[in-house]
Image (cartoon, helix red, strand yellow):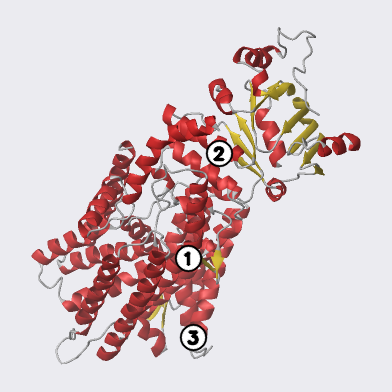
Amino acid sequence: MTTSTARSRSSGTEPLLRVRGVKKSFGRVDALVGVDLDVPAAQVTALVGDNGAGKSVLVKTIAGIHEADAGEIYFEGERVHIHGPRDSARLGIEVVYQDLALCDNLDVVQNMFLGREAVSHGLLDEDAMERAARETLESLRVRTVRSVRLNVENLSGGQRQSVAVAKAVMWNSKLVILDEPTAALGVAQTRQVLDLVRELADRGLGVVMISHNLNDVFEVADRVAVLRLGQMVGQGPASEFDSQRVVELMTTGRYSGDRNGSSSAVREEG
Amino acid sequence: MSAQDERKLEREPAEAEAAMSAEFEQPRTFGEYVQRWWTQIRSGNSGVLPVVLGVILIGIIFQTQNTKFLSAGNVINLLVQGAVYMLIGMGEVFVLLLGEIDLSLGFVGGIGAVVVTELVQPGWGWPWYAAIFAALVVTAAIGALQGTLVTRLRLPSFVVTLAGLLGWQGVMILLLGEGGTIPIRNDVVNGISNGTLSRGGSWLLMALVVLVFAVVQIIQDGRRRASGLSAPRRFMTYLQILVVAIAGVGLVLISNVDRGVGRFQLSGMPIVLPVVFGVLVLWSFILGRTRFGRYIYAIGGSAEAARRAGVNLAVIRTAAFTLGALSAGIGGIVYASRLRSISTSFDGGTIVLYVVATAVIGGTSLFGGRGHPLHAVLGGIVIAAIVNGMSLLGVSAAVQYIATAIVLLASIMVDVVVRRRGQTAH
């Protein structure tokens, strides 16, 4: 293991996040049975799979909400032990859950700084927070949010998603995990969010996007990882996948086009 | 490279749209402010407008029935009557903001009143400030206890504070003993509700408040404007200051009219008004400018979001219950001060229902996340105006209750209907 780490480092392809053989059971239900996942920096990795494939469990394990029963997680080449959400946040891992976790009655600035408010002399430093929130939104090219002092309840679905993502990347995060960011969005708003996802990767962040929508996946993803019944049945550059292949992997765990019929479809890197 | 360019091209229309709307971010003229305000009201963000209209309407109705209603003496009397509801109501706002309710605040206030009354008796002989401090510590402790039961054991606040409503009444009766009524033998404590500032003192205090408000507002808005943050235009800042100054001058003018009966002269601002104002400023400051206040709103908006943001829900919730009970203690002391005594006839049950009504009438939501101490003050004026106006007209208590109920229902209806329209407008 150490030799392989050293080798991949020297070749400069060590992924930002490396998950190896992670297992997780809930009682008698095996949610994850030895999952491997590589998430390189500056790329969008789409995590796809049918309902119950274990996508959410995998994400929650990386985020520290669940603790893995077995397996290793490496972050920036170092073995890490994530016991809680605080651990993952300290590493620079941020998750944007489907429900977004925004407070409707607070404005954009207040939401982006919730729990990490800027304080000067014991009082909230609204000026500094508003400035930083604006800068972040601008740097992410989120220009659809009209006023950062608007309450979140007055924003559209796409705007809310943008705010949630901006909130996640504000804190020097290195890896952002997005759970179904385009679910329940219209065409134009999906466009906004996908642009934003692309922007994150262009900035050098590692991005994991859970999605059901293969159109979105192939539009924005650099890599695809397919999960089925708690196992990673295929992962690799998006160029090596097409919709048919992904669907087959998701449903049967193998791809009829594979010569060797192996379940590990693509394992080119290392 | 080419892909990047394509993406940029695609973004252009959105950018143009954003640039246009950015210009609308801050209105330029007074007309535009009015327009934006109207849009906000139409989109369900009516703020304190309904309650202000309500106060005006109530004023017109009672004034046409009895011309004494808006006399200087009666207006001041009304404000003093409402002070108890306003003070306890400001405490209730803390709890309502969380989406919880505290039904015990009436009798918690009663406990505060009893503690002060007992401690300034010759037997104990405590100075007034020590007695008041002790009473506030006791009421705050009660709030902390009830808050702990709600947050740590996850008992419903409705039930815990309903038990409080019964239990603290019992404790109060025990403390008062056989006699039933204890007079307050301390001029300072009695002076809270019955004393007044001198005419000159009233002017001086008002001038000081307006001056501080003006300076703070000008510096703050100026700094934000200078650093390009969203700030009101300069004329709006001055307009705000002007409105506050006019309100202040008006209040002092009314206070300084002689409202004595016969040869007995009485004028000047009742001391309880600055007390209410002070609590209002302090609580608004805590809610608006501190992390603690921000988290109270956040928990009311989405407890789950607050939890994921690392907010310690139990600590914030317990502290809110504590501050609520502390405010109730202040209200209870003011109540006893007005009667110069405290007795077993203290009806904390009715008071707490009026108190919840003041907050809701003022615009605080029962579902949490939306509210402000100012709502309790405005709602307190409405409740006091109804009670005062009806007794001025010689209407029976039965009709007073019914009228208050109708106003309460109307205020919730205005709120819900306006908000629902805002939601469908999306």
Q: Are marks 3 and 2 on the same chain?
A: no
* Quadrant, the N terminus of chain B: top right
Residue picked out by circle 2: A199
Q: Residue at x 36, y 77 (%)?
A: B215
Kind of residue indicated by mark 3: Tyr
Circle 3 is placed at which residue position? B129
Q: Chain of mark 1?
A: B
Q: Give the percent coordinates (x, y) of residue A147.
A: 39, 50
Amino acid type at image mark 2: Glu
Please tell me whether mark 2 sits on a helix, a strand or a loop: helix
Q: Is A41 left or right of A133, judged from the image as shown? A: right
Residue A52 visible in the snapshot: no
Residue A246 shows in this picture: yes
Disc 3 and disc 2: Cα gap in Å?
Answer: 61 Å
Q: A104 or A204, which lies in front? A: A204
Q: Earlier in the sequence, mark 3 or mark 1?
A: 3
Quarter of the image with the C terminus of chain B is: top left
Q: Residues within 10 Å of mark 1 (few under 14, many from 20)?
A: some
